[in-house]
Amino acid sequence: MTKLGERLKGKVSLVTGASRGIGRASCLQLAKEGAKVAITDLIDDEGRELLQEVREIQGNQEQNGRNAGYWHLDVSNEEEVKSVFEQVKKEFGNINVLVNNAGIAGPNKPTHEVKGKEWQKVMDVNVNGVYYCTKHVVPMMKEAGGGSIINLSSIYGLVSAPDLPAYHASKGAVRLMSKTDALFYAKDGIRVNSIHPGYIWTPLVAALGEESEVGVEEFRKQLDSKHPIGHVGEPDDIAYGVVYLSSDESKFVTGSELIIDGGYTAQ
């Protein structure tokens, strides 16, 4: 039986949008389970702070601090994705786990009021970013004999609501991209799954609260009430799902949707 702290020993993981929220929590949990962690984001200061936390965890496991690193990465830029992935491979070896977490909310207004450039920005990050990262990790995973690609979708990749139209469209795309790639690469030992969080209290969601007419406190209460379990989730609730899909415990899981939503979509 695998010991706690060794579920991901020997695996190289790369997380996009890693500096805050779900990405940050995922990096910490991946490190706690023994993975090498490539932290990537546009928020460099917080990313480097996270790197130190990850290295402290790895130090406690008597691992070498070089088992973690930070790279500046704009996932909407394919050349940057290619370059960073090659650097990670050179530093740690082939990537075994890719967590496509980077995403933005986009404009909160009806579809007919969304400007073309606003729509495109969301697609560039939330959809093209997943495509670019998948495109450039697959050859590495094939070379390694398999791997796990984990795409962060949303409850709004399953159901919808009258807000954030570009975001909802992008997360629906991520859901089906995951299934398609699961079918393409199953023969190569590469598993592809999507995670569908309910409302998780992250900086992105907090920012929506700040923009709302009711204020952050009331906004959070309203979100709590949407979940049968009675409250919104925490980043670790999703990070534990990331660890599971990264590990060999999920070796028979591909093309699936891991819904972690406090009962939201059961209603």
Image: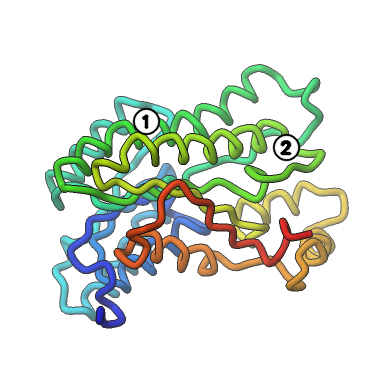
Mark 2 — residue? 164
Marks 2 and 1, the one that precedes in the sequence: 1
Q: On residue 228, which mark appears?
A: none
Taking the spot 16% from the left edge, 47% from the top edge, the residue there is 144
Taking the spot 53% from the left edge, 57% from the top edge, the residue there is 258
Spot occupied by residue 229 in the image (x, y as percentages of width and height): 73, 72
In this rendering, position of residue 207 left or right of residue 110: left
Q: Secondary structure at mark 1?
A: helix
Q: Is residue 106 above or below residue 151?
A: above
Residue farthest right in this picture:
214
The answer to whether residue 167 shows anywhere in this view is: yes
User: Badge 2: how crowded within 10 Å, few (<14), some, or many (20+)?
Assistant: some
Q: How many marks?
A: 2
Question: Which kind of residue does numbered mark 1 sit on?
Answer: Tyr
Question: Which kind of residue does numbered mark 2 sit on?
Answer: Leu
| Rendered-image quadrant of the C terminus | bottom right
Spot occupied by residue 47 in the image (x, y as percentages of width and height): 38, 54
User: Badge 1: how crowded within 10 Å, few (<14), some, or many (20+)?
Assistant: many
The answer to whether residue 44 shows anywhere in this view is: no
| Rendered-image quadrant of the N terminus | bottom left
Mark-to-mark CA distance, 2 and 1: 23 Å
Spot occupied by residue 21 in the image (x, y as percentages of width and height): 52, 58
Mark 1 — residue? 132
Q: Quadrant of residue 105?
A: top right
